[in-house]
Amino acid sequence: MPQWVKNCVKFGVCILPFSADLGATSLVFSLLGIWKQRYRQISAYPLHWGLGLFTFWLIFTTLFAFKPIFALEGIFNFLPSIALLAAFTIFFNNFARLHQLAWWLILTSIPLVFLGVMQLVWGWETPFFFRPLGIQLIAYGNPDGRMSSLLMYANTLAMYLLMTFVLALGLWIDTYQVWRQDSKKRLLLPLGILTIAVVGDGIGLILTNSRSAWGLGLLGLMAFALYLRWYWVLGGVAIAIGAIFWAAWIPWGQDTLRQIVPAYFWTRLTDQLYDDRYVTALRTTQWQVAWEMMLQRPWLGWGLRNFTPVYQIEMNVWMGHPHNLFLMLLAEIGIPGLLILGGVVGYILFGGVKLLILWSKDSYSLHKSNLLSNDLFYQRRQRQHLLLFTYLVTFSMFVFFNCFDISIFDLRLNLPGWILLSAIAGIVYRYQRRLQLF
């Protein structure tokens, strides 16, 4: 792979949250370079035939869309991402590149959180001449009082920080374990940076005031606690969640708990902070309309981006999407379209989980054979196991987040999501003979 391709990938990933235009342009150049160099290898991968089938289905449903022009525009939210997934599966084919990718994403989150804090506390905003580049910091956040940093909206920032929080947590655990075994303590600086990232991203998630991000952040923390068998962490998280839910909804002893639990949390859960929303702005209303659209056209759907005009006709209100990716796809491209895309993504995730299970069995065999746990191969395999687990948990956060919001309409969320999936697919591709998947 040419060095310029690697540099374009690195620059694109690092600059993307600060300028979507510059980041996407750099990634497109790397994408073209990979396709030019490895076209035959990409075409020969059976998984990519599923991506080709999904592309054909998107084009086919456009011909029968309620508003074909809207559907044609919607295709371009998917086609570049599909091409990226196919190419980057070949690029991210080893754990060294997965480790680098995680670091690139984590390092972007530190300035984002800093700017977000300055945005809320001091009312920082970007000068007007930065806005044509897509660099926009809104004073006191968007919506007002919620951290949005350079990603312009609180929920968008919340998903980005959720991704980097989970990645930073996984790398922190890995680095800490290696640091403990290193007598010279040479990893103190990376460990310090990761500590800043974990704490900073956690604070940033709180300040976005996103309920789904709060819940998913705690879910990610619990996943690592289970992985490491830190049951005391699980207990602490369960107590914290129980106290917040009690303060929000359970009447017995509620007054006492509301004096203990910060109102910032339980008032957000009960929606007392935003109790003036109309029925048409509620997610449940949007989900109901999307479900009814699917029932009316279950096979071909209404066409991509056609939820918006249908919702406007039904509710007399403009709504960009139904805040649930799966319901949106069911409504817009029908049941077959969702099954094709779900099959491709599910197959990749299944391969990653199967690889984790196989490596866990290998580790057990090594211990049973009385091999030393400080064997270099054993240590490397354990670190690879943790890194792959981290990627699987991180991408799972994207899947869960898209049950309550949709990430594909913002390049700064859409592209990292597909890149993470391509990284998992690259490792599955590398070990496909062992997995016997393809």
Image (tube, helix red, strand yellow):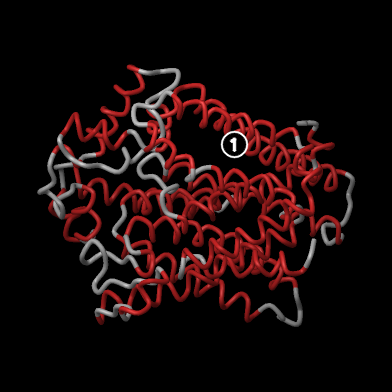
Most foreground residue, 197 or 64? 64
From where the camera sits, is residue 294 visible?
yes
Please state the horizontal and vertical placement of residue 12, each as a whole percent of the image: 58, 66
Most foreground residue, 44 or 69? 69
Query: Looking at the image, is 402 positioned above or below residue 128?
Result: above
- Please name the residue shown 19% across and 47% down the image: 270
Q: Quadrant of the C terminus?
A: top right
**Residue corresponding to mark 1:** 345
- Please name the residue shown 49% across and 50% down the image: 222
Q: Amino acid at mark 1?
A: Val
Disc 1 element: helix
Please state the horizontal and vertical placement of residue 271, each as a whole percent of the image: 18, 48
Q: Quadrant of the N terminus?
A: bottom right
Query: Looking at the image, is 82 positioned above or below residue 258?
Result: above
**Residue 250 is drawn in which quadrant?**
top left
Most foreground residue, 346 or 308? 308
Drawn side of residue 370 relative to residue 154, left or right: right
Most foreground residue, 374 or 129? 129
Drawn side of residue 228 relative to residue 180, left or right: left
Drawn side of residue 386 relative to residue 14, left or right: right
Please state the horizontal and vertical placement of residue 287, each as a whole percent of the image: 29, 32
